Image: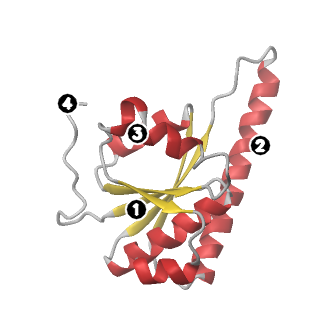
Amino acid sequence: MADRKTRQAFEKGHTRKFMVIVDATPESEVALYFAARVASRTKGSITLFYPIEAGVMRRWVGIHEVENEAEETRAQSVFRLYRKKLQDMGFDDLSTETVVRKGDPATEIVRFIEQDEDVAVLVLGASAESQGPGPLVEALGQGSWAGNFPIPIYIVPGTLTRDEIAHLA
C-alpha cells in the first residue's frame, strides 16, 4: 500500500471522522458510544458504515434485485436506529454521515477509507462471545491488512459498559 493518500482530517475545511461499522450487533453499539465520546470531545464526526456482503451468483436476477433492495432497506433502518441511539446517548449535535457499500466487507471498508481522506480512525467493537472477536476484527487485525492498514483501528471490548467507556474516551 505504497501510495496512500495523506489524511486531511486536521486541515482547514476538513473534519476528523470516526468510522463505525454498524451491523445491529451489541459490539457495534459499544463501538458507537466510544466513537461518539471521542468525536464529541475532539470536535470530530461519525461515519456510520453499513457493509452489504456480496451474495453468491443467483440463478434468477429478480431474486438478487429483491435481496439487494431488502438489504438497502435494512441499512436505512439500522442508520435510523443508530442515529436514535446517538440522541439517546446525548450526542444529538454530533455530525453523522451514512455509507452503504456492497462487496467483501473488509475490502469495502478499506476502499472507502482510501477514498475519504477525512476518515482518521476506524472504531470496531469486539464481540464478547467465546467464539472470538468477530469476523471484521479478525479480518482486519490479521493477515495482509494487519500491518498495512491505512489508519489506526480502535478495537473496543464488547464487555465494556457505558460508564467504563465514559472514563476512557
Q: Amino acid at mark 1?
A: Phe
- Which colour style is shown? secondary structure
User: CA–CA distance between discs 1 and 3?
Assistant: 14 Å
The residue drawn where x is 55% and y is 31% is: 104
| Mark number displayed over residue 118 | none
Please tell me which of labels 2 and 4 falls first in the chain: 4
Q: Residue at x 51, y 46 (%)?
A: 137
* Marks 4 & 3, CB-CB < 8 Å contact: no
Residue 112's quadrant in the figure? top left
Tell me the amino acid under the disc marked 4: Ala
- Residue 18 badge: 1
Looking at the picture, how far across and down is residue 127, in whole percent? 61, 55
Residue 70 numbered tag: 2
Of the two numbered discs 2 and 4 in the rendering, the one whose residue sits closer to the viewer:
4
User: Disc 1 vs disc 2: which is toward the camera?
Assistant: 1
Q: Residue at x 31, y 76 (%)?
A: 42
Label 2 packing within 10 angstroms: few (<14), some (14-19), many (20+): few
Q: Are marks 2 and 3 in contact (CB under 8 Å)?
A: no
For mark 4, what is the residue?
A: 2
Q: CA distance from mark 4 to mark 3?
A: 14 Å
Percent coordinates x, y for residue 57 in the rendering: 71, 17
User: Which secondary structure, mark 2?
Assistant: helix
Dot 3 corresponds to which residue?
110
Which label's residue is closer to the chain start, 4 or 1?
Answer: 4
| Residue 50 vertical position relative to residue 159 in the rendered view, above or below | above
Locate the N terminus by quadrant. Answer: top left
